[in-house]
Image (cartoon, helix red, strand yellow):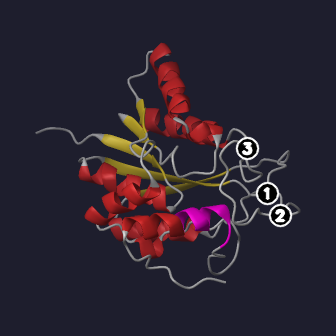
Amino acid sequence: MAIQKKAVILFSSGLDSTTVLYYALSKGYKCYCLSFDYGQRHNRELKSAAKIAKMLGVDFSIVKLSLPWSNDSLTNKNKKIPAGKQFKNVIPSTYVPGRNTLFLSYGLSYAESIKAQTIFIGANALDYSGYPDCRPKFIKAYNNLLKSLGLKITVQAPLVNLTKAQIIKLGSKFKVPYQYTWSCYKGLKKPCGICDSCKLRKKGFKEAGVKDPITSYE
């Protein structure tokens, strides 16, 4: 009897990471979801992550991190979240320095411990906010690091070259419950509808010709 392959999913409950989770399940992986409480003002996403993981019956863990030096607008509440901009050549204030490097390092530790073959991340380099750790060369560099260490673990970023519309179309095939996902950068009860993440989400659903099940905004 073949042993089921394992994967650690870096899971925020956002549109991208939730699609990646369903993608990994479709590929036959036994999934272990890993979420992070790193002082983000939108830690409302953790409730959504727990809900989706429970619905699927997959393993779910939250790692709590402290970034006392933070000066970005996601973790520093004295900073204003930029509204309605899509950044192309400037890294926005919502970029948390080193965040994906930290997340992948924890994911690697987890993967080694449970003998998982891969780590999935929902990084996307087309319809995104310009974060340097969401680009293909970042994923390639991290995989080169793992290879240089002699580890047989790889990082997969299956959405990295897809638009938001393409991601939504893919997720729709898997019947991803987008009504339970959380994209908004602001720590509100409902999505704000105007931050960069909300704007990109709206753009993606419109271009995909799919109705966003989240229609109520602050």
| Residue behind mark 3 | 90
Q: What type is the residue that disc 3 sits on?
A: Val
The picture places residue 164, in percent across and down from the top left corner, at 46, 57
For the residue pair 94 and 86, the one nearer the viewer reads as 86
Which quadrant would residue 55 be assigned to in this image?
bottom left
| Residue behind mark 2 | 80
Q: CA distance from mark 2 to mark 3?
A: 17 Å
Q: CA distance from mark 2 to mark 1?
A: 6 Å
Q: What secondary structure is found at the residue carrying circle 2?
A: loop
Q: Is residue 174 visible?
A: no
| Residue drawn at 82 percent across, 48 percent down | 70
Above or below, comparing residue 135 to residue 11 in the picture: above
The dominant secondary structure in magenta is helix
| Residue drawn at 49 percent across, 26 percent down | 140
Q: Any magenta on residue 68? A: no
| Residue behind mark 1 | 73
Q: Any magenta on residue 199? A: yes
Which mark is first along the chain, 3 or 1? Answer: 1
In this view, the mark in front (1 or 3)? 3
Q: Over which residues does the magenta segment extend?
A: 194-201
The picture places residue 157, in percent across and down from the top left corner, at 43, 41
State if disc 1 and disc 2 touch (CB < 8 Å). yes
For the residue pair 168 and 50, the one nearer the viewer reads as 168
Q: What type is the residue that disc 1 sits on?
A: Ser
Which mark is first along the chain, 3 or 2? Answer: 2
The picture places residue 182, in percent across and down from the top left corner, at 54, 68
